[in-house]
Image (spheres, grey):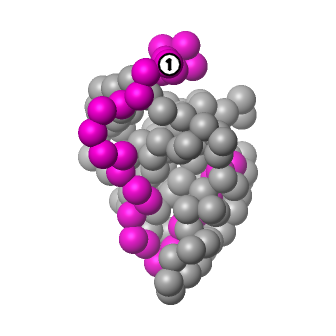
Amino acid sequence: MSASSVLSSGKTSGQNPQLPMAQVFLLVDAPEALALIDMRVPRPSVVMASFGALDHEILTQVNPDCIVLPLLHPGIDIEQALLVLAALGFGGCICALCPALPNRRMVESELRAFAPGLDVRLIELPEAAV
């Protein structure tokens, strides 16, 4: 999925989902998610990792309820990331951070088609955070 097929000047209609309530987050190349997590009470556990470090061992050690990664990032192919997580047997929520999209639900559907059975959500961030 290319950036040009995702981005537009429009804004998705409807309410933007938030990060789920989780006890453990694994942030994969997504430090901008800290601002969404830090204000929670009680504050959940957060582990940060790079996409290259994502393997069965880290998933076993961290045991995240939710993995957060960017939708558009030079070092991550979101489709590949979803396939890797599915192959590793991850069963939690996967949140992809992105700028405002013209049709968030359509993009979510496309992402879910790459890895059926995964709980994939797009979280639109304010422009200043992207």
Q: Residue drawn at (47%, 42%), measured in percent from left and top? A: 124
Relative horizontal placement of residue 106, taking residue 73 as reference (left or right): left
Relative horizontal placement of residue 102, taking residue 116 as reference (left or right): right
Q: What element carries label 1?
A: loop
Q: Residue drawn at (54%, 54%), measured in percent from left and top? A: 68
Residue 20 in view of the camera: yes
Q: Where is residue 50 in the image (x, y as percent from the top left)?
A: 72, 51
Task: Give the number of callouts.
Answer: 1
Residue 60 in view of the camera: no
- Residue reaching furthest bottom? 42
Q: Residue drawn at (34%, 26%), measured in percent from left and top? A: 103
Residue 25 among those drawn in magenta: yes
Q: Which amino acid does label 1 sit on?
A: Ser
| Quarter holding residue 61 | bottom right
- Residue reaching furthest top? 4
**Mark 1 residue crowding within 10 angstroms, few (<14) / some (14–19) / many (20+):** few
Residue 41 among those drawn in magenta: no
Relative horizontal placement of residue 71, taking residue 10 as reference (left or right): right
Q: In this view, does 56 lie above or below 6?
A: below
Magenta stretch prevailing secondary structure:
loop
**What residue sits right under mark 1 in the picture?**
9
Q: In this view, does 7 lie above or below 75?
A: above
User: Magenta span covers which residues?
Assistant: 1-30
Residue nearest the viewer, comparing 22 with 92: 22
Q: Position of residue 110 (x, y in %)?
A: 34, 27
Q: Residue drawn at (56%, 74%), measured in percent from left and top? A: 39
Residue nearest the viewer, comparing 5 with 49: 5
